[in-house]
Every structure is written in structure tokens, then in C-alpha cells.
Image (tube, rainbow, N blue to C red):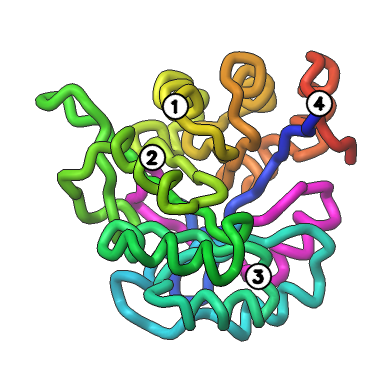
């Protein structure tokens, strides 16, 4: 049986790890390399680095940070933010990333997904989807630029398209649930999982160990991702895994 994964997320802005609520009110958390080392030691299954200001400001990829972090890690690392081309992906993988996460660039140029998948393998290509519910249209829509810009692309339509283009994994963030610490968006995640055959990482809403066990019991996602509760040490990865294992969720123990 495939084991479920627990993944801390490091949102990096101007070289510092930050966290907000519903993508707003960012506060500084710490140094990305130090935090990565800490999570590696605490039993995380993977790490996700998202440079949330790179797409907006257009600054260079954080290759030095990736190189420094890769030297310290023994777990897979996914990097996203500011990636514009196949050459950018090549540079990040060369610096030590195991996977890349594409959002804005993929929405702008969907062919990048197929080009990257063919060159590096679909297992390296994770598509990040920042989804927000539109009450008027009664559907979820994709957002870009760190959740700042809305698109007219419906989330579920985009899921079908990126899988067809060769994406190997989805990182789905519910913007409505992000930072609220009231649990994951099971409805959205179940709909996506039901129509997709590739692994889904759930993001947005974790506030307790129970939220992870509920996520894995009530949906078929492959991984749960969180930031605030791990950064603030409200809940440890050990506690999350112990509870999940206790409830029968297959998981690598710490």
C-alpha cells in the first residue's frame, strides 16, 4: 500500500520564509535553509519551496538557496515560483530540486507542461493550482501570481487539461481555506481526485493532527501539505504521523 506523505511548505519572499492567511498579511518565519534542515530532521516526507514573489517581481530563481538546501536534505524537494521556461526547470533540477512546481507559467503557456514532461519526465512536473470559489458563478477558478490575479479558467477544467499534457502531480491549494486552520477543503479535493489519476497534494486549512487524518480517511489524496502549524510548532510532524498511523492511514513513521 502506498504510504501517505506529510509535507511542510516554505513560502519564500525576498529570501525569507513567510506565512499569511488566505495569501495576505504575510509575516516572517525564518531562514529557508535552516527550516529545511529542521524539517528533514523532524521526519517530513518531502519539502516544498515556493518563491511567492518571483513571478510578481521577476527576480532570478533562488538557485543558491536550493544548492545550500540540497546539501542538507535526504528527502525530495519541490521548487516553484518564477519558473518561465524549460531552461529554468533544467537549472533548478541541476541545483538539486527533485521536482518543479508550475502555476502561472503553465496557465500562460500550457505547452510548457508537455515540453517539460517530455524532456525531464512527468514525475518531475508538479502543477500547482491556487483555487478560489466564485459565489456568483458557483465554481472554483484558478489564480496566478501568488493568489493575486484571477483567471477565467475553471479549476476542474484545468485539472483535466494538465493531466492530458503530462503533469505528474498536482499541488492543490484552496485559497478560501488557506491559513484558516479549520481543516482541508474535502469537497474540492474529492472532486479533483475523482477525475484525475495522478497524485494530489492537498494544501490549505491544516490546523491540527486530526485535520490530516480526516483528510486521508475522507479523500484519496496522496499527501497533506501545511505551513503555519509546523512553523509555529502548534503540531509536530511526529504527532501528525502517530495519529494517522493509529487511525490506520499508511504512513512512514518518524
Q: Which mark is residue 250?
A: 4
Contact (Cβ within 8 Å) of mark 1 with mark 3: no
Q: CA distance from mark 1 to mark 3?
A: 28 Å
Give the residue pinned by disc 3: 97
- Quick check: is 26 in the magenta stretch? yes
* Disc nearer the start of the sequence (1/3): 3
Q: CA distance from mark 1 to mark 2?
A: 8 Å
How packed is label 2: few (under 14 Cα within 10 Å), some, or many (20 or more)? some
Per the image, label 1 sits on a secondary structure element best described as: helix
Residue 201 percent location from the top left of the image: 57, 40
Left or right of residue 42, residue 110 in this image: left
Q: Quadrant of the N terminus?
A: top right
Residue 31 percent location from the top left of the image: 63, 70
> Which residue is rendered at x = 57% and y = 47% of the image?
227
Q: CA distance from mark 2 to mark 3?
A: 24 Å
Contact (Cβ within 8 Å) of mark 1 with mark 2: yes
Foreground: disc 4 or disc 2: 2
Left or right of residue 208, residue 39 in this image: right
Give the residue pinned by disc 1: 195
Q: Which residues are magenta?
A: 20-47
Amino acid at each position: 500500500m502506498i504510504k501517505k506523505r506529510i509535507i511542510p511548505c516554505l513560502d519564500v519572499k525576498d529570501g525569507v520564509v513567510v506565512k499569511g492567511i488566505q495569501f495576505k498579511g504575510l509575516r516572517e518565519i525564518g531562514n529557508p535553509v535552516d527550516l529545511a534542515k529542521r524539517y528533514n530532521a523532524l521526519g517530513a516526507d518531502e519539502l516544498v519551496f515556493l518563491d511567492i514573489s518571483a513571478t510578481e517581481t521577476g527576480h532570478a530563481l533562488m538557485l543558491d538557496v536550493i544548492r545550500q538546501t540540497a546539501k542538507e536534505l535526504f528527502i525530495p524537494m519541490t521548487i516553484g515560483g518564477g519558473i518561465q521556461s524549460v531552461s529554468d526547470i533544467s537549472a533548478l533540477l541541476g541545483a538539486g530540486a527533485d521536482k518543479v512546481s508550475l502555476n502561472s507559467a503553465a496557465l500562460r503557456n500550457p505547452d510548457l507542461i508537455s515540453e517539460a514532461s517530455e524532456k525531464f519526465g512527468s514525475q518531475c512536473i508538479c502543477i500547482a493550482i491556487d483555487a478560489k470559489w466564485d459565489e456568483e458563478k458557483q465554481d472554483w477558478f484558478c489564480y496566478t501570481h501568488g493568489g493575486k490575479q484571477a483567471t477565467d479558467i475553471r479549476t476542474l477544467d484545468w485539472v483535466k487539461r494538465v493531466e492530458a499534457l503530462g503533469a505528474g502531480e498536482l499541488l492543490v491549494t484552496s485559497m478560501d481555506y488557506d491559513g484558516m486552520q479549520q481543516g482541508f477543503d474535502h469537497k474540492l479535493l474529492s472532486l479533483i481526485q475523482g477525475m484525475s489519476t495522478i497524485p494530489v497534494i492537498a494544501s490549505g486549512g491544516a490546523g491540527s493532527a486530526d485535520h490530516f487524518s480526516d483528510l486521508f480517511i475522507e479523500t484519496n489524496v496522496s499527501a497533506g501539505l501545511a505551513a503555519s502549524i509546523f512553523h509555529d510548532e502548534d503540531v509536530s510532524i511526529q504527532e501528525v504521523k502517530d495519529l494517522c498511523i493509529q487511525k490506520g492511514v499508511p504512513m512512514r513513521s518518524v
